[in-house]
Image (tube, rainbow, N blue to C red):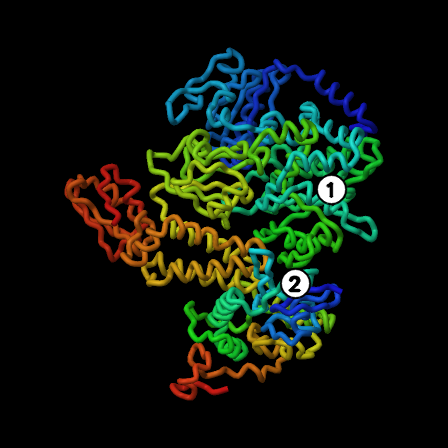
Amino acid sequence: MVELTIDGIKTRVLEGTTVLEAAGEMGIVIPTLCYHPGLSAYGACRICIVEVVNGNSSSLEASCTLPVAEGQVILTNSAKVIKARKVIIELLIASCPNSKTLQDMAAEMGVNKIRFKIKDKDCILCGLCVRYCKEQMQSGGIGFIGRGTSRRVATAFGVTPEECRNCGGCEWICPVRERACMTDDLVNGLCGRCQNLVPVETCPVCTRCSESVGAHGHKVY
Amino acid sequence: MKRLKSAAELEELQARILSRRDPNRTCVVTSVGTCGLARGAEDVAQAISKTLSDLGLKDSIDVKTTGCQGFCEIEPVVVIYPERILYQQVTPADIPEVISESVIKNEVIERLLYSDPSTGQKIIHEQDIPFYTKQNRLLLDNNRLIDPHKIDDYLALGGYSTLAKALFEMVPEQVLEEVKKANLRGRGGGGFPTARKWESCRNAPSSDGVRYVICNADEGDPGAYMDRSLLEGNPHSVIEGMVIGAYAIGSHYGYVYVRHEYPLALKNLIIALEQAREYGLLGENILGSGFDFDIKISRGGGAFICGESTALMASLEGKIGEPRPKHIHTVVSGLNGKPTNLNNVETWANVPLIINKGADWYSQIGTEESKGTKIFSLVGKINNTGLVEVPMGITLREIIYDIGGGIPDGKKFKAVQTGGPSGGCIPESLLDLPVDFERLVQAGSMMGSGGMIVADEDTCMVDVAKYFVKFLTEESCGKCVPCREGLDRMLDILTDITEGQGKEGDIELLEELGGVIKETSLCALGSTAPNPVLSTIRYFRDEYEAHIKEKRCPAGVCKALITFTIDEEKCPGCQRCIKVCPQMAISGEKKKPHIIDQEKCIKCGLCRDICKFEAIIVS
């Protein structure tokens, strides 16, 4: 057993547990996007960052991949964490403005203004679908291609691979429900069931600002 | 080649090689590293061989081709031994004269000599050139004596004796202790104590005893080529270092991960590995000691991120080259989940030196915290472009002015960018900063693998920051959000600023965003990526403000913010600019001042470059 302190409360958890899991056991909610308990931790979205206090200094680490350690002191909701988390959600919304999940999360964090240029992507590249396909379906039909801003989820050579069993798991697990958007040809793409892809008519960014809900063509979810 | 079965046999072989060599024999050496090749050194080397055989001197005069000798500015270089007369920028047409006058008659050819840009003085001997005299070339000096295709050249310099010393006279713990005492730190950029890494890897549990040793030769920084030069010119020093390291760690499997873009380094390395294997210096039962170790080569596919240790190992495993969190270190669980020790090319090349000459000797060089020498590739707006190897603790001023020969065309120094794309820009006020791992970080930059790009007064620092951020945006693996999205948004803001669309608050937003990227990114690429932006804001904030508030680029670089006009008083109407303008934007009669049509002008600057009268005004 390992003893650590999360948000001022001492706890004992099994060795090998992650900080995210340890916090979860205590009922402390840390927002996540690329995490799923049934899949390997990936540490890509960085929404789940926590502050690891080490004497006078501290660092930010993604809690989903951070293993617990004896005597660790963790803050899940410090000013430093909130500040960084807000910028990260702002970056995500600027990239994928139409995602309801992201908008909800931003609203929760009190982010209601995007200072960056708005792009028109719809995949946050969390890799849940890729991991689901590989780890739960033992398929590996989809994967990442490209790097940097060109990175995207795709099938090899843009065709439905033999490995794909049309299970729809990738679509089911997508936290922003846009998995298949990345495929040009949906029928020949992954599963073809794209009911979640109905375009949402909203202003470019909806942060559920209470005063304007329903007005100016805003769509109320 | 006969397989060597003991240290004594190695010694015998070395003695035999030396006995066949006469140090006073004339030898014509051409350096054919990648930079030499780019400037036609291959043709020069062929011309030398041909001329000598035409003259029937093939048997009396030796010819040698070596790797890069570091002074790229003056390539192709031909050096005549034993006196070391150096001829610069030699063309094949010069060779008959070099052979007949200099080699045979022993007369110096004035016009091919190197002349010191600061004094204008002609220098005959290689060893007297200030570029070389002010350096401490512990690692690079042997490049000039070694034909990388001939292991005998390396053995003649006492090569692999250090390996024999380690294998037969020392136990692994002693080797480790020696490296620890020397306080060797990783030359790939992080500066992590090498011995501590080795020790952790040695002590990490491995169920089947498998441990890996990796040489990171995925050098991807723009303008940096230290590792390439070592691998091309002296591959055996790296191999020897790796075998010694593997012995200390208890590893039997090694990898060199080398960039696909380094074909010559790869070729020389393959040849070197084969020759080392034939002599029994690699493979099973090395030198009859009972120690087994072999090295495989893996070629990178051109991704910058694969220079990061965990991404490199993922790539070696055949997976996508993307980093993973390092909460469990690679020395505990790295390649294939086994304890893995990864060091950079230059670090490995340092190992034989330390074991051979001892930690006490080694730790005399350098500063308190950073020992030994460091190779920098000095490029950009500098007179003496090339590779410089200097002791740690030397000041930037000494590197740039004493070795680098200062800024060309009498321009003013503005900044030096160290540490590769994610390093920072250091201004003139900090030129007396001693170069070591800690000081560079304090100045907002870092050692990195050793790139050093000099900027002069005509360089726009916002543009520089934009260039590096663009590079990193493309080279980020794209896995984590702060690095992928954050850098892209940073690039958006910087692009706006350079295009005159910058607004109040942009600098603060860049600072805030930079801070978050630094703190929350998954790997070292992301956590250092904002450095070029943050350091230029720190030292050149006025330039950012001029772009944003006054819509003015002080250095006259950002096209959207400058206009080209012609000074009527200075323009004699020579029509040279009219001929060179690709847009036909300049008009005017002969001997009358010309005019630039602003609508057509694309601000390419060709007119400014060609004008002899400084009549083109950039404002």
Looking at the picture, how far across and down is residue B265, in whole percent?
62, 39
Looking at the picture, how far across and down is residue B426, in whole percent?
43, 44
User: From the viewer's perspective, is residue B311 above or below residue B383?
Assistant: below
Looking at the image, residue B560 sits to the left or right of residue B22; the answer is left
Q: Could you tell me if residue B271 is visible in this image?
A: no
Number of disc labels: 2
User: From the viewer's perspective, is residue A180 above or below residue B482?
Assistant: below
Residues B61 and A102: in front is: A102
**Are there few (<14), some (14-19), or many (20+) residues within 10 Å of tag 2?**
many
Q: Marks 2 and 1: which is nearer the front?
A: 2
User: From the viewer's perspective, is residue A167 above or below residue B293?
Assistant: below
Looking at the picture, how far across and down is residue A74, in whole percent?
61, 64
Specify the quadrant that holds the N terminus of chain B: top right
Looking at the image, residue B498 sits to the left or right of residue B56; the answer is left
Helix, strand, or loop for circle 2? loop
Q: Indicate the amino acid at tag 1.
A: Ile
Looking at the image, residue B238 sits to the left or right of residue B75; the answer is right
Q: Could you tell me if residue B174 is visible in this image?
A: yes
Residues B302 and B418: in front is: B418
Residue at the disc numbered 1:
B295
Q: Quadrant of residue B228?
A: top right
Q: Indicate the amino acid at tag 2.
A: Leu
Q: In the current view of this chain or complex, which residue is farthest to the top?
A: B105
Residue at the disc numbered 2:
A66
**Are there few (<14), some (14-19), or many (20+) residues within 10 Å of tag 1?**
many
Q: Chain of mark 1?
A: B
Q: Chain of mark 2?
A: A
